[in-house]
Structures are given as C-alpha cells and as structure tokens.
Image (tube, grey):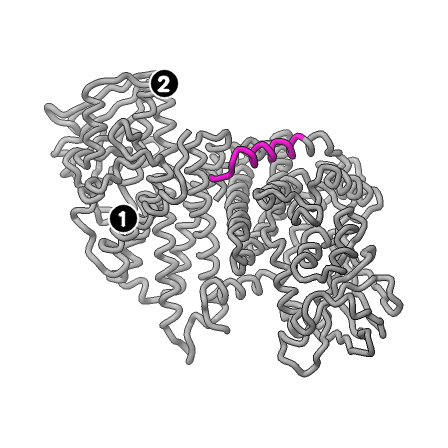
Amino acid sequence: MQIVDESTLRLLRESAADFCKAITLATGNEPSTRWWSDIAELGWLAVATAEDQGGSGLGLTGAGVIAHELGKAGYARGYGETVALTHALRRGLANGDIAPSASLEKTLDETLTGKQQISLLYPLGPNAANEGLVPDVGAMHLMVLTLGDDQSLSLHQLSDVTRQQLIKTTSRSRDVLVEFHQQSFGNGSVRISLGKGSGAQRVWNDAMETHRILAAAQLVGVAQTALSMALDYANIRSQFGRLIGAYQAVQHAIVDILACTDAAELLVNHALAAFDARRPDYLSLLHAATAFAREAAWTSLMKTYDVLGGVGFIEVHPINRYTRAMMLTLSSLGSASECEDAAANHVCPGHWLAT
Amino acid sequence: MLTQINPAIEQFRREVIETFTQLKKPEWLELDPESPEYLAHGKTMDQALIDRGWYALHWPKEYGGGGTPDTFLRHAVLRELEGYFRVPTFGGHGRYIVGPALIEFGSAEQKARYLPPIGRGETVICLGFTEPDAGSDLAAMQLRAERQGRDYIANGSKLYITYGHYATSILLAARTQPGSKKHDGVSLFLVDMKSPGIRISHLPCLTGHMVNEVHFDQVRIPEDTLLGEVNRGFYHMAAALNFERSGLDLPAKYMAMLEDVAEFAKNAGLWQRSAIREAVGRLASTLEAWRMICWRVVMLQLKGEVPSWEASMAQLYRKDFNPQFGRLLLEVLGPQALIERGQNRSPLGGRVEWYLRESFNNHGQGGRFVTRNVIARRGLNMPRS
C-alpha cells in the first residue's frame, strides 16, 4: 500500500504547473523539443518508482499529477504510458510474475533517466495485432511491450529504420507505423523475453490498467485547458451587442464542460489513490474513471469548438494543437463502448460496498 | 478527496454497513413512500439511528451530537449508506436543516425548546420557502407577516411543501419589511402547523409523493418563534440550506438501483446486449463521478468553507442523471417497466416503475437550466444574461 500525503502532492503539482507553464501550447508556443529530457532531469519519469529503485516513491498518484499537468500544457502522449509500463514491469518483477534479467534492469533504469521510452502498440484494427502505431517522443531508444497469442510477454526495441517509418496522423507528431516482423528490429537490436503464461498475462493486464488511468489523467488536463479557452473567449467576444458569455446557451455549454472536467479530475485522482492502495474497489473505480474521462475529454473539446465558432477552426488556434495531441491517447483507451462495457462488468449487487 | 479517510472512519463505515444489512427489510423497496406502512418503517429506522447515537451525529455534543473531531466525516459516511440501503425515514427537515440552523442562529430558549424533540425524531418540520409566484426566483416571495403587538400576523401561501401534510412545524420565510430590497426584509419563523388559520391543500406528485400548498390566513405567530435576526431571513435561509448540500445519499441510492437493474438484466438474459451493458457502464461511471462532486462539498464544509456553486454542481449531476436512468429502465425492461407495484408481473417488486416516474423529478431547488445559470455566475463569474 502506498499512500502519499496531500502536502507532497500539492508541492509536486505546483512544481509541475510551473514547468508546464513554460512549455504550454495554449499560448501558441511551438512544442518543446526538449520536454522529454527535461522531465527526466526533473525526476518525473521516476516519480512512481520506489525510492530504493531510484525513484521518488510517490506512486501512481504522483505520476497522475504530472500526467495531468502535462495534459494541460498539451503534451498528452508518451508520459503516462512509459511510467505505467515501467511501474507494471517493476511490480511484475517484485511479484515474481516475470523473470529478472540484466537487460530488463538496464531498460528500466534507462527509462528513469529518459534514454528509453516504453510504449504499447496501438493496433490499426481489431484483427491487426501485428501492426499498429507508436507515438515516438524522441528518446534515445524506443521499446514496445507486446503480449503474444501464446501469452509471451516481450519488450522489443525498435530499430532506427523502423523509427523512420513515420506516418502522417492527426497528431502531426512522430507517430511510427510498426509492422511487427523481424525487420522492425534490425540487427543487434534488443528483444527481451519477459516470460509466458499467467504471470505474464497478469503483468500485461496491470500494464494496460495503469496505462489507462494515467492516460485518463492526461486527457483530463487537455479538457481543462479547453475549458479555459472556451471561458476566455466567451468573456471577450461580443456578438449582437453583448458578450457571447452573457447568452445562456453559451453559459450552459461551458458549465457542462466544467461539470465533466471537474468530476473527471476528482474521479481519476480517487481511482489513482485506490490503485496505489490496491483497495478492493480499485479496478471498478479505474474503469469508471477511464470511461468518464474519455467521454469528458471528447465532450469538452466538442463544446469548446461550439463556443469558439469559426476562430477555433483556424489551424493556428491553440485548441487545434490540443485536439491533435489528444487523439492518439484517446483512441488508445479503446472505444467509448469498450470503456463503458469494462465499467459495467463491475456492477452487481453490493459491488459498491467493497471499499 | 476520499483518499485520506482514516481507519476509524473505515471502521465506522463497516459498522454502519453491518447494521443496515441486519436491519434492512424487503418492504422498504416495495411500499408506496406515502403509505402508513412505509412511514412506520421510517419511524422504526429513525429510532434505530437514535438508539445508536447516529440520528443527530453531526450536531455538537451538547445538543446530542457525536462530539468527536471526525463527527462530520462519520455523518457523511452515514448519509451515503442511508442512501445506498434506501433507509426509510419518517421525514422532515429537522435533522439536517432546521436543527443545524437552530444551533447556528437560535436563541438559548429556542434551542432548549426545539432541539430535544427534533433529536428524538418527534418533530417533523417542513420548509415554507417557495410560493406560487416565487419558485426559481425565491427572493420574489410575497407572503407577509406584519407586526401586531408581540406577535406577527401572516397572510399568503407557500407551494410545493414536502412533508406539509403531516409536519408538526414549518420553517416559514415571510416578508416582514415591505418595500425593502428584494433579498432584504424577509424573516424566518418556526410556526406550529396546528396554528389557527393554516389550511393545507394536497398535491400528489408523479412519484406518489405528496407536496402541499399551505395557506396562511391571519395566522398569529408569536415573536419568540423568530429564528435569527429580523429581516435577515433570506440570508439565514441560504445558510440553513447549506447545512445539507452535499446530497451524498443520492448517487449511493442510484448506484443501488443501478445494481438492481443490472442484476435484473443479467437474470433476464439481457446482459448479452451490448447497448444495455454500455448504458449501465456509462451510468456507473457517472455515478462515481457524481459521488466525487458530492464529497468535494463535504470536504469544503470540513475545512469550514461554505460551498456555493460546488453544491449546485452536485444538484446538476442529479438532474442530468435522472433522465438517463429512466431511459435505461425503458431500454432494459420495455413495457414491463410500466407495471406498477402490487401487480405480480411487476419487476423488482414494482420499484422499476417507480424509478421510471422518479426520473422526471428534476426541478427541486431550481431546474436544470436554473442550476446551470447559478454555476455560470457563481462558479465561472460569467455575466448575467
């Protein structure tokens, strides 16, 4: 059980907010090219890692704070996933679900220092487990975690050639198209076999769950910046002789954004704390939080476009950077239906009392 | 938020769960909420809470409350579980609104007179605020109480008064200084419902609940029933309503209902329909989110702050959730959802049909539009339309 006190989290949030203010895309900045190495230097890639393993020991709750602030600044990819997968692999090692090895230790250590990014492969379709997209944040190495049909869990380092296979996507970032065959890895690249069977499956599930909740934290940050943009615009734009923020229709749209983003933030934080403490209801909360945050992010962006009108659709408007940044993370959670289905699976008599 | 709840609170939660699990009766969910049998269960449960020192747990110790530093959190946990177990109550606003208001604004004599019977569950108090022409715009109230010697004489009427048909007292907001600004010149009185000149008209609601119009015709109100400062009643009223603003019982109540409906769908072979599972998942997620919004209100109160738009947000969740829940019921059950309690084909003891009607109950303390207006102004500082 890992419980982080409120004052530590507040300090972390203030520190993250200060850093993110300098790199935020909301003010029209170009995306920082150094953000990954900067956050590594700040120790934020190690925030969830235990102190005796070189981290800060602030758990997923601490990582959620960073993920949220990065999302607010428009950096909605890479961070939550790398921290989540590192965390799950460390747990797998501690529980004996995966085999220890020097190469795995090296990979995990390099992740803390920013040399390594660990990602999932976002399959291009339901029957396309062997090809998918990977968001590349520009770290020295990029590893992909996979679970084979035979329940074999592996880390694959993408070759330089593969990392050059950029594909144009909405994100306008370094999205790599990976076709999962030997050529993706090249000569001398690293493939780490982590084990097979139920232990490997447990680690995979843990990795996916952790990824989902941290991705949700990043999405909430994006949605809250959308709220700020909508509110700011409603308070300066006049039409028909008065501020558009004086019209009930506009007010109600912005209240709806506030309602879903506020609740999403509270619920994601609650789920993260439950996850850290491994409370009996943590999975139920996690799936509820993910489904809610996914919907909140989508709704917030759409309603923000409603408020902004034509100006929001001009490419250079910062809202478009956020939209582009968010899409791959949002789609990595699966469809809204899948998220809702996962939440529904926990609903049975008395489930809510299991806290 | 909830992450800091300490082991003592967790222990209390388990104790309440155990108690309610032992005391709960299937009839709670099957009876008409206005039936004498249901109200008898309410009295029994009120007494069960009193016996355990839980009924007025949130009051200070000198008035029969818990008196421990974590009392407020315990009360919040209790409220949530009362909602989840759908514990019946005999009703009245004494326990949550008028009692705390008396403790805050009442004179020593008023506290001695009114608090003990409220704490024993003997007094049922209704709230007399809304009027035929003062609903969302509550400050437009017109009922007048004119000073006459040591008394006030009240004339006018109050509308949509819950519990009015069996309340023993009414917390009456009356205009005592005509011509003053809209929010000024209002005073609060605790009036005996048996006072000569009070007449009650009953207005049954879609849910079977009763609300009432309470008419005041030359009703004599003794001056010692004035609660708080004269002509400051509107502000006292707002403060009184703040005492119980989290609404924590509601998402818990709906979660229990959702569990019922999901179980019904599973038993009826409907769970394989993805649309139903997705709707259940969507609503479960919303309930967890709504619950967090309610807990935020509790945590603000715990810090001594007065929740404003944050409490309105909790109300907004209720009002937005209700229609979605009604829709789910129709999707899961179709025409079967319409069979009333008491019929042998009614699903879940007839409570589905009741839930369906309840899903239209979204107007209290301002409808969905008014609630959004309040949040826009107080929470986002947006201009008045």
Horizontal side, residue B307 vs residue A20: left or right: right
User: What is the residue that sits farthest to the right in this orientation?
Assistant: B196
**Disc 2 and disc 1 on one polypeptide chain:** yes
| Residue B227 vs residue A307, the one in the foreground | B227
Q: Chain of mark 1?
A: A
Mark 1 highlights which residue?
A: A75
Residue B15 in the magenta stretch? The answer is yes
In three-dimensional space, the C-alpha distance between marks 2 and 1, rounded to whole angstroms, equals 33 Å
As rendered, which of A4 and A128 lies closer to the eye?
A: A4
Task: Specify the quadrant of the image occupied by residue B283.
Answer: top right
Q: SS of the residue at dot 2? A: helix
- Report the residue at 24% width, 19% height from top: A193
Q: Nearer the viewer, residue B327 or A62?
A: A62
| Other-residue count near label 1 (Cα within 10 Å), few / some / many at <14 / 14–19 / ≥20 | many
The image's mark for residue A199 is 2
Q: Is residue A239 at all visible to an observer of this figure?
A: yes
Q: Position of residue B122 (x, y in %)?
A: 81, 49
Mark 2 touches mark 1? (CB < 8 Å): no
Question: What span is colored magenta in the figure?
Answer: B4-18
What residue type is disc 2 on? Answer: Gly
The spot of residue A230 in percent (x, y) is 38, 63
Q: In this rendering, does residue B159 appear at all?
A: no
N-terminal label among 2 and 1: 1
Q: Residue at x 31, y 62 (%)?
A: A313
